[in-house]
Image (cartoon, helix red, strand yellow):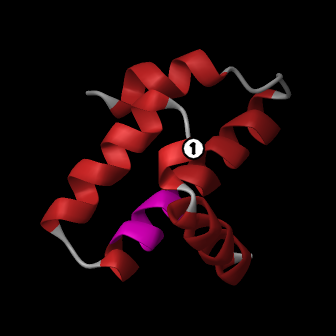
Amino acid sequence: MRRLFIQGARAVLQHRTKQAPGLSEWLAKLASRTHHNVVAAALANKLARIAWAVLAKEERYQPLALISLETA
């Protein structure tokens, strides 16, 4: 699973400008401070936490909650 999240994160990073504004901004700030592999791992961690929360709560994904957390 970890490898799949990393691969998914790398795919998102390749199309960073096409992402939601909050996510794109968060990725740009992180990429300016650290290595691209660290950015991919951080994004994979964020994706895994989102997936876990959706499965644990048995609710639909709500992207607005993601945008408000990213700018914090």
Figure quadrant of the N terminus: bottom right
**Residue 41 magenta-highlighted:** yes
Does residue 6 sit above or below 43 in this rendering? below
Q: Position of residue 67 (x, y in %)?
A: 47, 24
Residue occupying the point 41% across, 19% down: 68
Dominant secondary structure, magenta: helix
Residue occupying the point 44% across, 29% down: 21
**Residue 50 magenta-highlighted:** no
Q: Quadrant of residue 69?
A: top left
SS at circle 1: helix
The magenta stretch is: 39-45
Disc 1 target residue: 18
**In the drawing, does residue 64 fall left or right of residue 56?**
left
Q: Nearer the viewer, residue 66 or 56?
A: 66
Figure quadrant of the C terminus: top left
**In the drawing, does residue 52 fall left or right of residue 55?**
left
**In the drawing, does residue 34 fall left or right of residue 53?**
left
Does residue 24 sit above or below 20 in this rendering? below
Q: Position of residue 26 (x, y in %)?
A: 33, 43
Q: Quadrant of residue 10?
A: bottom right
Does residue 25 sit above or below 29 in this rendering? above
Residue occupying the point 58% across, 65% down: 9
Q: Nearer the viewer, residue 2 or 40?
A: 40
Q: Position of residue 48 (x, y in %)?
A: 62, 56
Mark 1 Cα shell of 10 Å, populated few (<14), some (14-19), many (≥20): few
Q: Amino acid at mark 1?
A: Lys
Does residue 12 sit above or below 40 in this rendering? above
Q: Nearer the viewer, residue 49 or 35?
A: 35
Q: Position of residue 6 (x, y in %)?
A: 60, 75
Residue occupying the point 63% across, 42% down: 50
**In the drawing, does residue 70 fall left or right of residue 15?**
left
